[in-house]
Image: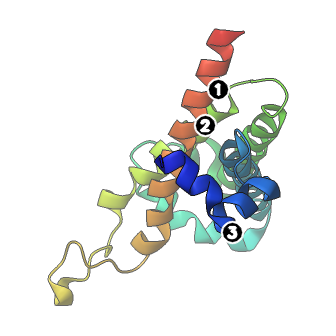
């Protein structure tokens, strides 16, 4: 008996097949939808004064985004980020039907935030021996490492779809 035949006889595998969880591209669609939701909620936050001040340590120490304050000020920088996040989220949403490379903006977003990690003041707990003992804002930024990987995944899939069209 082959492994495929054996797996087909497994009731758990049969149930998964019937449920649709093994449908082609389901993982891609779930990942894409989750990124749309992330950009919706994170973009929403950027329009309120509590977020203007919350962003100061991130923008001030971001080697790729430090320029936002001199150009736009605190509120303007937050609005710029919020508008960008909503734009990338909208492009990712549109990508369900027609690729518009929203994943390119998503990838750029998370490259910018991941590069803040080494520059975040008090990001590593000296009492615990420093790196890799995270403290302060660094644990919050670590989620962006995963979001960057997700963005690369979506970008690759979108580029492949464009090439095939």
Q: Residue at x 36, y 60 (%)?
A: 117
Q: Is residue 41 above or below residue 80?
A: below
72 displayed left or right of 36: left
Instruction: Give the residue pinned by disc 2.
Output: 154
Residue 65 can be seen in this image: no
x, y percentage for residue 140? 49, 71
Under tag 3, what secondary structure? helix
x, y percentage for residue 91? 77, 34
The local crowd at label 2, few if under 14, some if 14 to 19, many if 20 or more residues have their Cα within 10 Å, is: many
Q: Residue at x 85, y 28 (%)?
A: 97
The answer to whether marks 1 and 3 mark residues whose Cβ atoms lie closer than 8 Å is: no
Q: Residue at x 36, y 65 (%)?
A: 120
For the residues marked 2 and 3, what is the alpha-carbon distance in whole angstroms? 28 Å
Q: Residue furthest bottom?
A: 127
Q: Earlier in the sequence, mark 1 or mark 3?
A: 3
Residue 140 can be seen in this image: yes
77 displayed left or right of 131: right
For the residues marked 2 and 1, what is the alpha-carbon distance in whole angstroms? 6 Å
Location of the C terminus (image quadrant): top right
Under tag 2, what secondary structure? helix
The answer to whether marks 2 and 3 mark residues whose Cβ atoms lie closer than 8 Å is: no
Instruction: Give the residue pinned by disc 3.
Output: 51
x, y percentage for residue 16? 71, 60
């Amino acid at each position: 008996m082959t492994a495929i035949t054996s797996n087909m006889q497994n009731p758990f595998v049969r149930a998964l097949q019937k449920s649709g969880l093994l449908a082609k591209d389901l993982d891609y669609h779930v990942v894409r939808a989750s990124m749309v939701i992330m950009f919706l909620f994170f973009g929403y936050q950027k329009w309120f004064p509590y977020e203007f001040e919350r962003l100061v340590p991130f923008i001030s120490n971001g080697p790729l985004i430090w320029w936002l304050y001199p150009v736009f000020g605190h509120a303007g920088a937050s609005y710029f980020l919020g508008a960008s996040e909503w734009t990338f989220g909208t492009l990712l949403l549109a990508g369900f039907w027609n690729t518009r490379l929203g994943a390119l903006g998503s990838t750029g977003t998370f490259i910018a935030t991941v590069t803040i990690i080494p520059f975040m003041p008090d990001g590593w707990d000296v009492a615990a021996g420093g790196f890799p003992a995270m403290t302060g804002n660094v644990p919050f930024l670590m989620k962006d490492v995963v979001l960057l990987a997700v963005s690369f995944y979506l970008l690759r899939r979108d580029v492949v779809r464009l090439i095939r069209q």
